[in-house]
Structures are given as C-alpha cells and as structure tokens.
Image (cartoon, rainbow, N blue to C red):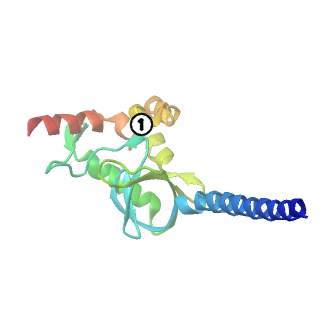
Amino acid sequence: MLEKKWMSLMKKLSLNLSSLIIIIFFYISFSYSDENNTIKGKAIVLDGDTIKIKGEKIRFGGIDAPESYYRGKKQTCIDDNKEVFCGQISKDKLIEKIENNSLNCKIQKKKDRYKRSVGECFLKDESLSVFMVRNGYAFDWPYYSEGKFANDQEYAKMNSLGFWNMKFEYPWEWKKKVREKK
C-alpha cells in the first residue's frame, strides 16, 4: 500500500516537473525571439551611421561614417581641391535614402560604450549599412565588422563611389587624432 502511494506521488511530481521544464523552455525561447531584438518605426538621422527611432539611438554595427560633429569638430574631405564636410555629406545621403519611410532594425544584445543600441537597419529588405558602404558614404570597420562589409567597400573603391572619389581619412583614425589633440 505504501509503495503504491509512493509511486503515485512520484508520477505527480514527475508530471509537475515536466510541465515546469516545458513552461521554462517556452518562456526562454519567446523572451529571446527576434521580436524582442527588433525596433521598427520612422527614423531621425543623427549621422551617417546613427539614427533614432522612438527615442532609441541606434548605431549601425560594423561600419563607420565620417563625423558630422565630434567633440566640436566636423570631419572634412577634399573634393576637387575643395574642402567639404564629408560627415554632413554622409548624413545627407542617409536622409535622402530613408526619406519618410519606416525602418526595421535588428538590434544586438550589447549596447556600445555610449549606451546606444547597435544593430543593422533595413528599408524594406535593403540593409542601410550595405547601402552606405557600397555607395562609398561609410566604411567597413574591420575592428567591429569582421569583414562583413568588405566586399561592399571594395565595390565602392573600385568604382570610385562617394568618398572613394575624394581624399579622405577613415573616421576612426580622424576621431583618434581629435581625441589626442585635447
């Protein structure tokens, strides 16, 4: 008799434990779904590689665009022997591309050192990072990209697109010089 009660109790515990494991599994799988790592909406362009959607700053991961404003300075390039604000050119190109369309951004789990979300944003199915690099208005940043945009950069370079038709300094090198001056 005691053995039957013991077996009955064990079956109930086994069922409850199985149910609990299934519930935990579903909770974990849904809490890490793509929906939780996606931001959608209309964007405000802050720079050639940074936007804001619904108050959330999003830095395009793996690329770097010339700075429109960094520590009180504007990054310049030389186009036809004239100094131009390449940071502003990059920003304007992104504004022109996005227009008033809604974006879909896939966000990485970790934020950058400035507490911005980092991700890749899409206009319909087109990556804005690919667009900016492939057209020469941003650069593959190998330190962060692991070469993800290297082919797009090579295309822009081979076809003298965007800044590849000008004399420029990579944004990460320019920012380092600005930081060292202060």
The residue lying at 42 percent from left, 31 percent from top is 142
Q: Is residue 28 above or below residue 171?
A: below
**Which of the image's four quarters has the N terminus?**
bottom right
Percent across and percent down for residue 153 are 46, 34
Amino acid residing under circle 1: Tyr
The residue lying at 63 percent from left, 62 percent from top is 27
User: Is 173 positioned to the left or the right of 8 in the image?
Assistant: left
**Which of the image's four quarters has the C terminus?**
top left
Quadrant assignment, res 125: bottom right
The residue lying at 9 percent from left, 36 percent from top is 181
Q: Is residue 152 above or below residue 112?
A: above
Percent across and percent down for residue 155 are 50, 33
User: Residue beneath label 1, please?
Assistant: 144
The residue lying at 45 percent from left, 43 percent from top is 135
Q: Is residue 20 above or below residue 161?
A: below
Percent across and percent down for residue 72 are 13, 51
Q: Residues within 10 Å of mark 1 (few under 14, many from 20)?
A: few
Q: Residue furthest left?
A: 182
Percent across and percent down for residue 117 are 40, 55
Q: Nearer the viewer, residue 159 or 108?
A: 108
* Residue 35 visible in the current orientation: yes
User: Is 153 positioned to the left or the right of 175 in the image?
Assistant: right
* Residue 104 visible in the current orientation: no
